[in-house]
Structure formats: structure tokens, C-alpha cells
């Protein structure tokens, strides 16, 4: 269902919360006007998930807006008193990453991150009034769970929709990485803010893999076209 | 003829739109929500900045006047309280104007205004800036006819039509929100209250979606035009955008 800002979403188009969750979760692009109205704020397609009792507007344009719980790739700008100052998106206030929000960090042993280094972090809190806060550690367990400084690799810019597809696994339909992974070994890190870090061992391999993902994004290639692209890449590397 | 729009084609802007209609071509770019200068910062709301660049030459008070009108209209539809202490920067570059524009004898600011408003709205939709509603605008020109004393209306006329209907008694620009509220009302010329009222009614029929609404061509002086409500046109543009973004789902 294609919507314009200001459209009222009818009650029957929204999932009814049953089971454990008693309430409906509204994602990006929807706002609640008490008592009973759900209105749209952006233009796009209305998507609902009955299992999670959630509804949101899907659209692939605009800039990344920090939301709590997202995994992002941040660039360290400088080290301030108790935290690192990191950029998530250009031209926005920097996010703060506390020195102690790393696995095994104490006041005596702090991580050393130089300017322009990359960190894979989770957004701990992001409200509209304050700058976002990052963390590289799971708050309940104290373990890093794959978060922390990213060593090696090259940064590639991808669209926000592509980043969501890569993080969605098989539902995202990005088969080219699977096809390439059959013959090549590489490591990728995906941030919801539209950043992809590829480490393919050699310069040629890294560039080829990164460019392949960008081409799937720009040309919206289907599975067959992605297989052909992967074969072309493997021939040249 | 319906206006044409291309969305999200500039890759360095958060949102962009090129709008072409009746010889006018405008490129709009929106950046936001981005960092705002401390002196322009508003504690609980977003700051909106509009820049209008003319087709030829540098900006003059005419462009500043258009910027003020656009700023007041757009600020009333952007949900500024949901993105406080940020900046929404809207830049509108006029690429081309119709040839007869300078010889119509009509205020060129007002003839350009509806097109600027549409371009700005499309660019805001492309940038996913939160809006409370959409806005559509139209120009109505009133001119005397030989037959009757009452002036005839020209709805969204081309520059050629304005030239042929010279002398024009008054021009009016109306903008309506998606809910049917009048957001902008600018007039130039000599007119009575009744004439203004009728012009406002025609504008509302063209801009807003009503059951059995009148199209751009029906019942007006222009003949042989396909009637299309502006809100329907806007919905079609968004439909095309969504289909383009989701083409990967059905690609082979």
C-alpha cells in the first residue's frame, strides 16, 4: 500500500497484537495521534509484520537516522575526556563512545583508537534531543559479541535499503556474496548507516567484492544476474 | 498536461527532485536533518532554510521574497518538533523558464511560485523529512472577455495562454494541504472579493482530492486537456518511486 505523508492508516491495515505482545509497535514513518489515529509522516510503502505486531514505512532514500539498538560502523574523530567522539553520518553531531564500553576495559587499560579508525558498535541510546551514544559491549553480559575496532579492510558506501537487506540474511536476496564465498575467502562488516567494510586479503579481491555489492545495489540485480556477476568477478580475480 | 517529476537522482543530496511543467524546469535538493549553526539553532524545533536560485543572474529581493513565502508554507507542514536542533536545507535552482514569460505582463514571482512549491515538496518527500501532510498549489489568472462583464478564469495557464489573454486583471496563487486547508494565498492585481472567492473555489477543486473532484481541464477555458487532480498526480509520482526502489524484489 503506497502512502503519502498525512494519510491515516485504517485500523484493518494494521496487525492486531495477539499473544504475548499486547501492544502494536510503530516503526519509522508512522506516528500515533491519540486516541486512535495512526498517521504517516513519509512517502513509501506500508509494511506490516504480524508476528512482531509491528508496522512501518519502507523507503530507500534520505539519510540514516540514529535509532537505539542498531548496529553501525562509526569513524573515530578524536578522544575526549571519558569517551571517543565518533561520526555515524556526515554533517551531524558526533556520537560518544565511552572508553569503558569495551570488553575487558578498566580505568587503567583503555583501548587505543586513533583518529579515522573504524569501530563496529551498537547504538545504546538515541533520542531526538541528545547526540547518540554508542557501546561496543552487550550491557547485560559485558561481552563484546563481535563489536569493537575493525582491523583492515576497505570502506564502501551502500544505500540504506541495501544495508538492511544484507543484515536481513536470506530474506534480503543478496546472493552474490554466497556465490563469491564458494571460491573466495573474505570478511565483511555491515553497518545500518550504509557503510560496508570488506577485507578480501588482497587489494584486487577487496575491490572486486566491494564493487560487486555496490553494483547489485545500484542495478537492483536479481539472483540470475547476481550469479553472472559473481562468475565475472571470479574470472578476473 | 500533467507535470513531470524525477526523484532522488542527485547522489550527493539526501533528497532531490527535478520538476518540469509548462516550460518551467526546476531542480530541488534537500539536505537534512543535518547539523545547524549555533546561532540559527531552535531548541525544540528544526530550522528550515530555503534558497531560491534564479535561472539567470544572481539572487535579488525577488528571490528573497519567494524564499520567505516558501519558508512559511513549508514550515507549517514539516514536523519540526520531531527533529529539534537540526537543519533542513532546501535549495531550488530554476533551470529554465518559458520563452514568453517576460512579455505576459504578469508578476513573474507569482507564476513561478506554484512550481517552486511542488519541487520543494517532491524533494522533501525524496529526503524522507517527516511531514504532517502534503501541499499542492495552482495559479489562477482572471482576465476580461468581450462578452461578459465578469472576468473569465484561466486555471494553471501556460505563458502562451497568458500572453494571448492580455491584459490580465489579476493573478492568484493558492496552496492547499492534503487535508484541504488553505496554506498560501498570494494575489496581484485588481479584483473584487467575489472574484477572489470563485478563484479560491476553482483552486481547491484542482488541488484537493474530493469525491468527484474537477480536473485541471474540466469546465475551464482551456479546451482539449486531460483533467487530472494534483493530489492524484502526487500519488502517482510516489507510486513510481516506490516501484523503482522495490524493483529488486521482482528482478531476475
Image (cartoon, coloured by chain):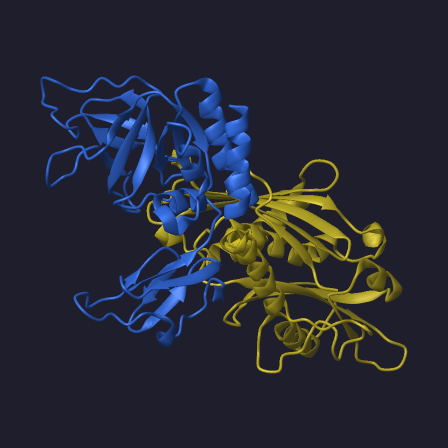
Chain colours: A blue, B yellow
- Location of residue A6 (image quadrant): bottom left
Residue lying at 22% horizontally and 17% vertically, measured from the top left: A112
Q: Can residue B35 be seen?
A: no
**x and y, in percent, of residue A98 in the image:** 19, 29
Q: Is residue A189 positioned above or below B105 on the image?
A: above
Residue B77 vertical placement versus B9 (above, below): below
Q: Name the image quarter holding residue A52.
A: bottom left
Task: Indicate the position of residue B87 as horizontal and vertical percent values.
Answer: 44, 42
Q: Position of residue A45 (x, y in %)?
A: 46, 61
Relative to B229, residue A141 above or below: above
Q: Residue at x 42, y 30 (%)?
A: A183
Q: Residue at x 79, y 67 (%)?
A: B169
The reply, left or right, for residue B39 in relation to residue B230 is left
Instruction: Report the label total.
Output: 0
Asked whether, in this view, residue A231 is left or right of residue B154, the answer is left
Q: Position of residue A11 (x, y in %)?
A: 35, 75
In which quadrant of the rendered view does residue B47 lie?
top left
* Residue visible at 61% across and 46% down in the picture: B28
Q: Nearer the viewer, residue A190 or B133?
A: A190
Q: Is residue B89 left or right of residue B46?
A: right
> Foreground: A12 or A144?
A144
Q: Is residue B171 visible?
A: yes
Amino acid at each position: 500500500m503506497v502512502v503519502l505523508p498525512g494519510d491515516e492508516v485504517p485500523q484493518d491495515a494494521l496487525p492486531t497484537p495477539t499473544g504475548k505482545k499486547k501492544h502494536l509497535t510503530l516503526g519509522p514513518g508512522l506516528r500515533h495521534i491519540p486516541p486512535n489515529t495512526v498517521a504517516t509522516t513519509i512517502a513509501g510503502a506500508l509494511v506490516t509484520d504480524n508476528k512482531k505486531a509491528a508496522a512501518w514505512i519502507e523507503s530507500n532514500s534520505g539519510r540514516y537516522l540514529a535509532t537505539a539498538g542498531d548496529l553501525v560502523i562509526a569513524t573515530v574523530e578524536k578522544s575526549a575526556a571519558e569517551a571517543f567522539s565518533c561520526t555515524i553520518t556526515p554533517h551531524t553531531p558526533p556520537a560518544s563512545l565511552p572508553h569503558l564500553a569495551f570488553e575487558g576495559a578498566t580505568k587503567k587499560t583503555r583501548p587505543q583508537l586513533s583518529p579515522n579508525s573504524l569501530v563496529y558498535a551498537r547504538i545504546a541510546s538515541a533520542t531526538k534531543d541528545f547526540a547518540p551514544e554508542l557501546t561496543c559491549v552487550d550491557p547485560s553480559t559485558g561481552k563484546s559479541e563481535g563489536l569493537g575496532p575493525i582491523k583492515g579492510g576497505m570502506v564502501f558506501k551502500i544505500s540504506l535499503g541495501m544495508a538492511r537487506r544484507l543484515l536481513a540474511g536470506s530474506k534480503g536476496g543478496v546472493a552474490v556474496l554466497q556465490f563469491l564465498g564458494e571460491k573466495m575467502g573474505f570478511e565483511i562488516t555491515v553497518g545500518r548507516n550504509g557503510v560496508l567494510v570488506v577485507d578480501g586479503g588482497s587489494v584486487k579481491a577487496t575491490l572486486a567484492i566491494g564493487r560487486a555489492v555496490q553494483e547489485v545495489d545500484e542495478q537492483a540485480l536479481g539472483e540470475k544476474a547476481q550469479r553472472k556477476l559473481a562468475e565475472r568477478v571470479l574470472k578476473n580475480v | 498536461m500533467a507535470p513531470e517529476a524525477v526523484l532522488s537522482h542527485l547522489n550527493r543530496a539526501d533528497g532531490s527532485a527535478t520538476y518540469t511543467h509548462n516550460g518551467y524546469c526546476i531542480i530541488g535538493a534537500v539536505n537534512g536533518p543535518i547539523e545547524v549553526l549555533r546561532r540559527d539553532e531552535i531548541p525544540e524545533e528544526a530550522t528550515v532554510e530555503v534558497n531560491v536560485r534564479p535561472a539567470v543572474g544572481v539572487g535579488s529581493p525577488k528571490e528573497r521574497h519567494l524564499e520567505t513565502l516558501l519558508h512559511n508554507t513549508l514550515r507549517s507542514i514539516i514536523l519540526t518538533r520531531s527533529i529539534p536542533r537540526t537543519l533542513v536545507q532546501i535549495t531550488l535552482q530554476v533551470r529554465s523558464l518559458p520563452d514568453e514569460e517576460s512579455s505576459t505582463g504578469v508578476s513573474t514571482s507569482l507564476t513561478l511560485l506554484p512550481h517552486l512549491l511542488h519541487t520543494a515538496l517532491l524533494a522533501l518527500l525524496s529526503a524522507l523529512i517527516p511531514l504532517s501532510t502534503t501541499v499542492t498549489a495552482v495559479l489562477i489568472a482572471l482576465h476580461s472577455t468581450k462578452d461578459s462583464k465578469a472576468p473569465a478564469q484561466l486555471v494553471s495557464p501556460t505563458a502562451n495562454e497568458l500572453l494571448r489573454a492580455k491584459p490580465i486583471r489579476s493573478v492568484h496563487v493558492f496552496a492547499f494541504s492534503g487535508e484541504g486547508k488553505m496554506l498560501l494565498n498570494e494575489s496581484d492585481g485588481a479584483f473584487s472579493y467575489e472574484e477572489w472567492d470563485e478563484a479560491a473555489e476553482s483552486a481547491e477543486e484542482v488541488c484537493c482530492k474530493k469525491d468527484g473532484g474537477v480536473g485541471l481541464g474540466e469546465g475551464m477555458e482551456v479546451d482539449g486537456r486531460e483533467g487530472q487532480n494534483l493530489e492524484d498526480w502526487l500519488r502517482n509520482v510516489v507510486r513510481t518511486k516506490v516501484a523503482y526502489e522495490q524493483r529488486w524484489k521482482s528482478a531476475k
